[in-house]
Image (cartoon, rainbow, N blue to C red):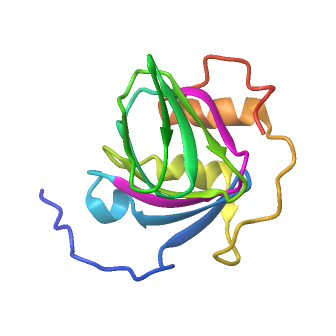
Amino acid sequence: MSTMIEPYALGPGEGEAIWYRGTLMTVKAGEQRTGGRLTLIEHAFRSGFAAPLHVHHREEEPWYVLEGRVQFTCAELEYEATSGAFIFLPRDVPHRFRILGDAGARMLLLSLPGGLEGMFRELGQPAPAAVLPPPPGPPDHEQMRAVAARYGVEFPDDMATMR
């Protein structure tokens, strides 16, 4: 049985808005709309946001920086990305990133195949408005590990320094 994927378009600011760890994520394309082929999420980050060291066992993670400065670490790659930069993070390779400077950042995440948006839905909450949420409190590390594991994401280090 074949599933027909329908064309669609979203304008600026349109898509499913999720608040996750003090960020605003706007899902532009997800598993359901793309037949599982990809996920595309526009991210808005505050200055200082840091994704802890983690590994995706199911998907590749290409990132495109729209605005701001972001320090990426993946295997031996250390890269300070600025507007217009592209970073490819392969599956099964530990990586992390941190937002630098005072202005925050905006990036596009293309996750191949799709489905990663489900993890952010479970760990975040629907955004009542397409704005950055208030700064978050400390994350529940055990909940993050449990939910992430269902999506093939692993945190090999201590997450106590995550903010």
Nearest the eye: 63 or 7: 63
Q: Residue at x 45, y 18 (%)?
A: 75
Nearest the eye: 114 or 12: 12
Residue 148, position in %: x, y? Answer: 58, 35
Farthest residue, direction bottom: 11
Q: Which residues are magenta?
A: 39-54
Helix, strand or loop: magenta stretch:
strand
Residue 130, position in %: x, y? Answer: 63, 76
Farthest residue, direction right: 137
* Quarter of the view holding residue 96: top right
Establish if 142 lies above or below 81.
above
Nearest the eye: 88 or 126: 88
Q: Answer left or right for 142 relative to 17.
A: right
Residue 74, position in %: x, y? Answer: 46, 25
Establish if 19 lies above or below 85.
below
Q: Residue at x 39, y 55 (%)?
A: 84
Q: Answer left or right for 153 relative to 127.
A: left
* Tag count: 0
Instruction: Classify the position of the N terminus by image quarter.
Output: bottom left
Establish if 3 lies above or below 150.
below
Residue 144, position in %: x, y? Answer: 68, 36
Tell whether position 42 is magenta.
Answer: yes
* Quarter of the view holding residue 45: bottom right
Q: Residue at x 52, y 70 (%)?
A: 16
Instruction: Classify the position of the C terminus by image quarter.
Output: top right
Nearest the eye: 92 or 117: 92
Tell whether position 55 is magenta.
Answer: no
